Amino acid sequence: MRYRTIGTGAARRRVSAVCLGAMKLGGDIDDATSFAILDRFVEAGGTFVDTANNYQFWEPGCTPDDSEALLGRWRAARDGDLPDELVIATKLGARPTVPGGQQDTWEGLSRPAVRAAAEGSLKRLGVERLDLYYPHVEDRSVPLEETVDALSELVDAGTVGMLGASNHTAWRLERARGLAEAAGRHRYQVLQLRYSYIQPRADLGLPETAHVHANSEHLDFVRQENAAGRDTAVVAYTPLLMGAYSRSDRELSRAYEHPGTAARLAALDDVAAQVGATRNQVVLSWMIDHDPPIIPLVGVSKVAHVDEAMEAADLRLTRAQRRSLDEAA
């Protein structure tokens, strides 16, 4: 297993190069299977787990508490057996306040909402501090200064170890960085965005309205931050496009219907044959060695999915193989 360092200063943490997405655990997936998935991930060297305070309220029979509460039960059941370096990241801002969960009913990112959300996540996870805390989405109804201040206060209080931002546009990230720097507040040190080897057309957008796909401006922002000594990590969700690389029954949205998709899939198949790996594994390896480096966040529903992803973390492509993937278009 390869590892990455996220954060700076006292917040600095060493995490596995693959992050386990716990969105379905405890909801769609029962406790026994969820525990087996988490146990296998840790056994294979995994130390980075991702959840949120709203997973999966939109699925029949599920509640916003399911994923965090499952992780809390797992931690309690494995008390003393988990690695000290385990990092559990969670998110706030998109939890529904009324049944139905339309976006205009989400909790948002006001100071009171931030404080209440943190208290809820601490209780469900059964921890005294949230390792990594992301605003799940932007909330433009609240001044950005208020959100930055409220989150920074959680770090000062010891409630949160490190801050990140999920599904934010590049200009909002830069504005938040400037506000934090000017006020001596804690900045976002990890960005969570959608990203994969196949790229969608920016003019069509994604069907999931709350998703923000990493673009050239996001990646340039991260490179410049890293060059300035403000180390900023990137975590990418949906790296395997919900199974579309390996399953014929998973169709891509219209945004992926362009000539570049076919060219990239052909290059992917060629490299996969060369290294004796699956398409998924080549995609994950390509992301791990990306410029800037990317930590793929892999959602799983079976132990076998964990094994495939963790094996990919040890797969190293040659320069020629990476070049053939990068130049395919």
Image (cartoon, grey):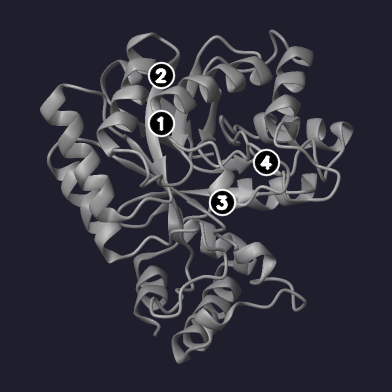
Which of these two is toward me, 213 or 107?
107
For disc 3, the neighbor class at 10 Å (few under 14, some 14 to 19, many from 20) is some
Q: In which quarter of the image is the C terminus?
A: bottom left
> Vertically, is 185 above or below 198?
above
Which numbered disc, 3 or 4, marks the residue that appears first in the sequence? 4
- State how far apart marks 2 and 3 are (Cα): 28 Å
- Count numbered badges in the picture: 4
Residue 307 picture location, percent across and down: 71, 47
Residue 275 picture location, percent across and down: 56, 67
Contact flag, marks 4 and 2 (Cβ < 8 Å): no
Label 1: which secondary element: loop
Q: Name the residue under label 3.
A: 103
Which numbered disc, 4 or 1, marks the residue that appears first in the sequence? 4
Which numbered disc, 1 or 2, marks the residue that appears first in the sequence? 1
| Identity, as a three-letter code, of the amino acid under mark 1 | Ser
Q: Mark 4 points at which residue?
A: 55
- State how far apart marks 1 and 2 are (Cα): 20 Å
Label 4: which secondary element: loop
- State how far apart marks 4 and 2 are (Cα): 22 Å
| Identity, as a three-letter code, of the amino acid under mark 3 | Gln
> Vertically, is 253 above or below 92?
below
Which label sits in the foreground, 2 or 3? 3
The residue at the point 66 percent across, 49 percent down is: 299
